[in-house]
Amino acid sequence: MTAQPEHHHDDEVGCCGKPLPTELPEFPNARVVTVVAGILIDGRGRILLTQRPPGKSMAGLWEFPGGKINTGETPEYALVREMQEELGIITCTDCLQPLTFASHAYEDFHLLMPVFACRKWRGEPQGREGQNLAWASLQQLSSYDMPPADKPLIPLLFDLLGPSS
């Protein structure tokens, strides 16, 4: 006798616990903002966080460094540029490992964010735009107040780096 799969294509209840719709939901017509983020991992397995400065949306929250992708840029190039502008470090696109992406609906826009790991760069990260920086172990990450799009990335980092980091 074979085991039945836990989820069936004809289940009445979705992953969120609510009933599945019977027809295509209304299109949200969201303004999609595409940004890129980097998970900088140092030789001790710590991860760099930057604190959003006063005056910016979500000020005071800690996030993975990165920023907007300009027209004509690849996500990888945008991240290399942002790391140089914001942190004063240099890396290359070949040093970026694609990890995952975040897709999060904020009240006035929808964020789409490719996420890359980076273990090699030249220079010491500094907050060139006045932002605070912190190196955190995996276990410390959840104690930082983070934007809703960044917080769900923490379990993926445990998968990547292992619980002993």
Image (cartoon, rainbow, N blue to C red):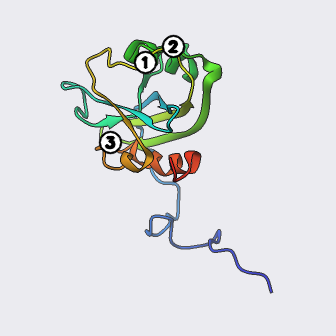
Looking at the rendered structure, which numbered label has been put on residue 100? Answer: none
> Which residue appears at 23% of the width and 34% of the height?
60
CA separation, marks 1 and 2? 9 Å
CA separation, marks 2 and 3? 25 Å
Asked if disc 2 and disc 3 are in contact, CB closer than 8 Å, the reply is no
Q: Position of residue 58 (x, y in %)?
A: 25, 34
In front of the other: 6 or 41: 41
Q: Position of residue 113 (x, y in %)?
A: 48, 34
The crowd level at tag 1 (other Cα within 10 Å; few <14, some 14-19, many 20+) is: few
Q: Earlier in the sequence, mark 2 or mark 3?
A: 2
> Which residue appears at 40% of the width and 37% of the height?
110
SS label for mark 1: loop
Q: Is residue 77 left or right of residue 31?
A: right
> Which residue appears at 56% of the width and 29% of the height?
119
Find disc 2 in the rendering and name its residue: 90
Asked where in the image residue 93 lies, by quadrant, the reply is top right
CA separation, marks 3 and 1? 23 Å
Find disc 1 in the rendering and name its residue: 124
In front of the other: 60 or 8: 60
Q: Earlier in the sequence, mark 3 or mark 1?
A: 1
Find disc 3 in the rendering and name its residue: 146
Q: Amino acid at mark 1?
A: Glu
Please identify the residue farthest to the bottom as the structure is shown. 1
